[in-house]
Amino acid sequence: MNVNLQNLNSTHKPRIFNNPERFVEGWYWVMPSKQLRVTEVKSVKILGRELAIYRGKDKKVVIVDAYCPHMGAHLAEGKVEGNELRCFFHHWKFDEEGFCVDIPCINQPISIKLQTWPTAEKYGMIWVWTGDIPKQSLPFVLELENKEYDVALGDYFLMNCHPNTFMINPIDVQHFQTVHKLSSEIAFEKQEINQNAIIFSNSKPIPKKSISSVLIRLLCKKNIAHNVCYWYGSTNIVTIGTDFFHVYIMFAMRLLEGGKSEGQVMLMTEKRRGIFGWFYNRVVLSLTKILGTHFIQDDVKIFQTIQFDLKTPIKADNSIMQFVNHLERQKPLMLKTWKLARSQNVEIKETREKEYDTKSND
């Protein structure tokens, strides 16, 4: 039984899913917070764009476009002075909002501004918003929104596929049985949280086969609650647990040139008080990391060699198609430039209009 590919073939909006040149405007991970010391500046390349990132004396992180507007020197070669960044080449200095505040050879700095990008720190990571003003929050665990939690950083990884392709794995119902030998009775229900977030929920009996089921039983003795929350099409949070105990695994990914991707794993659980609670959570997070690593090792082999092309979706792929349709309604940006991506029809129309205007002027 084929499913309806609603909105996927629309000519009125650009195609985002699995497109090697496009991503959704949103929050994306940059680096672990501990890798950027106070008054340190570094060069980073995020979603094809060259950036400079530094931490001021006030411990706040600032991210700016990499190249000085004077002659194009890379600002990561400069140095941090207080909360400001001075270019190494001609010593122009810019404040945390990007304004030029000092040019040594003249008394009054000229009116010029660096492009700065909204930043935040959460889960032990630095994040950047790929637009002017954040329209949504950082990816968060709904159940932990107003609670304290413990976090452990998992592995950094590279994938030979688009982030969107890897993202659909936790809601690929068929592969739970064929790859992981788990229950074939999984059925997800979707709920859109906002324009950029969607959650797929499932509740099933404890699986009775495979090493994965043994590891899961160490954490959960009763029926397992399993849901996946997606943010911006490139970050997901997998929740596993019972009614009274949950662990959370976040896979944060970003697009690389050539349609490949890089990602960072973060593990979370609700904070427990006292020495026993601290020790208990460390054990839980360690077991979760072992479980997650074992569970996806076969998936990784697939996604390192896959040439993804979903031409014949069936009923079992319904959750995947819902994810794709949700993604297609979000704001698309172009890799490298971070500018708004437009549909091919609009670009063709604009080209024709320019050609017509040129002929008219002739």
Image (cartoon, helix red, strand yellow):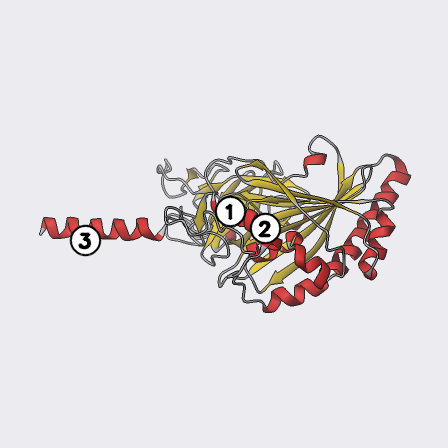
- Circle 2 SS class: helix
Foreground: disc 1 or disc 2 = 2
The one of 234 and 93 positioned closer to us in this rendering:
234
- Circle 3 SS class: helix
- Circle 1 SS class: helix
**As drawn, which residue projects farthest toward the bottom?**
305
**As drawn, which residue projects farthest toward the top?**
146
Residue 228: x and y in percent read 67, 46
The one of 356 and 125 positioned closer to us in this rendering:
356
The answer to whether residue 75 is visible is: no
Amino acid type at circle 3 is Glu
Circle 2 residue: 318
Q: What residue is shown at x 26% (from left), y 50% (from top)?
A: 349
Amino acid type at circle 2 is Asn
Amino acid type at circle 1 is Asn
Q: What residue is shown at x 82% (from left), y 37% (from top)?
A: 244
**As drawn, which residue projects farthest toward the right?**
276
- Residue 134 disc label: none
- Residue 355 disc label: 3
Q: What residue is shown at x 41% (from left), y 43% (from top)?
A: 104
Circle 1 residue: 325
Residue 94: x and y in percent read 46, 41
Q: Earlier in the sequence, mark 1 or mark 2?
A: 2
The one of 166 and 121 positioned closer to us in this rendering:
166
